Image: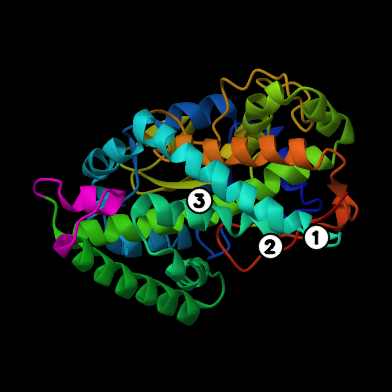
Amino acid sequence: MPFEQTHVLRLAPGLRALQSRGAVHRVRTAEGEEAWLVTGHAWVKRLLDDDRLGRSHPDPEAAAKDRGSALLAGLLGGLATDHARLRALLEPHFSPERMRALRPYVEQATGQLLDRMAGQRPPVDLRQAVALSLPIQVMCEWLGVPQEDKDRFGGWTQDAASVGDPARARQGLAELFGYCGQLVADKRKNPGDDAISRICATEGVTDNEVLGVTALLLFGGYETTVARIGTCVSLLLADPGQWRALVHDPGLVPGAVEETLRRSMPNPHNGGMPRYALTDFEIDGTAIRTGDFVLLNTIAANHDETVFADSGRVDLTRDTTDSLAFGHGAYSCVGATLARIQLQVVLTQLVARFPALRLAVGAEELELRHNTLIGGLIQLPVTW
């Protein structure tokens, strides 16, 4: 691993080949560690909500090295292994009422970005024009971060997720924590009607916990949504028939969002959600030992032909009930609603204002970002 991604918008052939042979496979990670890679939908879904797997190794000193786990531990400290407490801290701030209240801001910010895009001569890089800007503006509004600081911490989150440059990653994380520390101190003194102020007011929460959660939200709510906007739009534009269907019936937007989420954001590192076995057990007849490193590959699971027929094709009317794009069960993503709102608003406004939108290059010419854990596209050139 990682398996070669021969086409930016298709499942890596190596993943597809493994999946055809069974649900679980012995692999070697990019860090040189041996792991079990789970690719079958039924098993990935079951194990995402299985307390025989955890995010921390029973013996931390013996744990397999994993960049994603290390980043999470760097962001959250002790909270990285206290999932119940972390979720209890986060969930109230992602309530349906709070998310609905944020939607008008998302619509306004998106409209302003598309106004600027309309004033440019095509082709335009949609990633630069919309995807990079919208999530960071939304996170600032929701968390209570001054908009004038958005470019600063946007760069730090990219550095923190850097692959192959440990010094850059450490520096990005340090800058992000330094900024968040000052932000939390300011909110303690002058609370407002924002998520960070409300987290600060939670009974029993420590400054270090608020700091870790703030850094996690800034990171997780920004980088991943940038990548997902790029994936969503590129998948639809790569299939002009599906784009035209959306233009003719904007009521298909929610289904388009779910279907492109199922297809998942292109990630050249294509490993999976990292877990450690907390006891001996079996996965599809394969013996797993305590301490084994297990990767739950939701991208492969969402391409499992036994669940999603013709899984490589975008189908706006597909039943995506079993999609694992945002995890499952106790470990499902608390920020899923916020990500969905942004994707729905972007698509709704794009099809209304740019019905003739199309890729300015062939889909095979799109390139992946290899220097970050999150992946995503380097550019998304479009014309109209």
**Helix, strand or loop at mark 2:** helix
**Helix, strand or loop at mark 3:** strand
Image position of 320 (left or right of 212): right
Based on the displayed image, in which of its 4 quarters is residue 315 positioned?
A: top right
Instruction: State the image coordinates of residue 202 (x, y, percent, origin top left).
Output: 15, 46
Instruction: State the image coordinates of residue 203 (x, y, percent, origin top left).
Output: 9, 45
Q: Which residue sits at x=88%, y=36%? A: 240
Q: Which of 75 and 1 is in front in this view?
A: 75
Inter-mark Cα distance, 2 to 1: 8 Å
Q: In which quarter of the image is the N terminus?
A: bottom right
Identify the residue position indicated by label 3 in the image.
Answer: 35
Please provide the residue range marked out in magenta. 188-204
CB contact under 8 Å: marks 2 and 1:
yes
Identify the residue position indicated by label 2 in the image.
Answer: 128
Please say whether residue 81 is one of the residues in the magenta stretch.
no
CB contact under 8 Å: marks 3 and 2:
no
Q: Residues within 10 Å of mark 1 (few under 14, many from 20)?
A: some
- Numbered badge on residue 31: none
Instruction: State the image coordinates of residue 156 (x, y, percent, origin top left).
Output: 46, 72
Instruction: State the image coordinates of residue 61 (x, y, percent, origin top left).
Output: 29, 64
Inter-mark Cα distance, 3 to 2: 36 Å
Inter-mark Cα distance, 1 to 3: 42 Å
Q: Nearer the viewer, residue 186 or 36?
A: 186
Type of amino acid at the residue the image marks with label 2: Gln
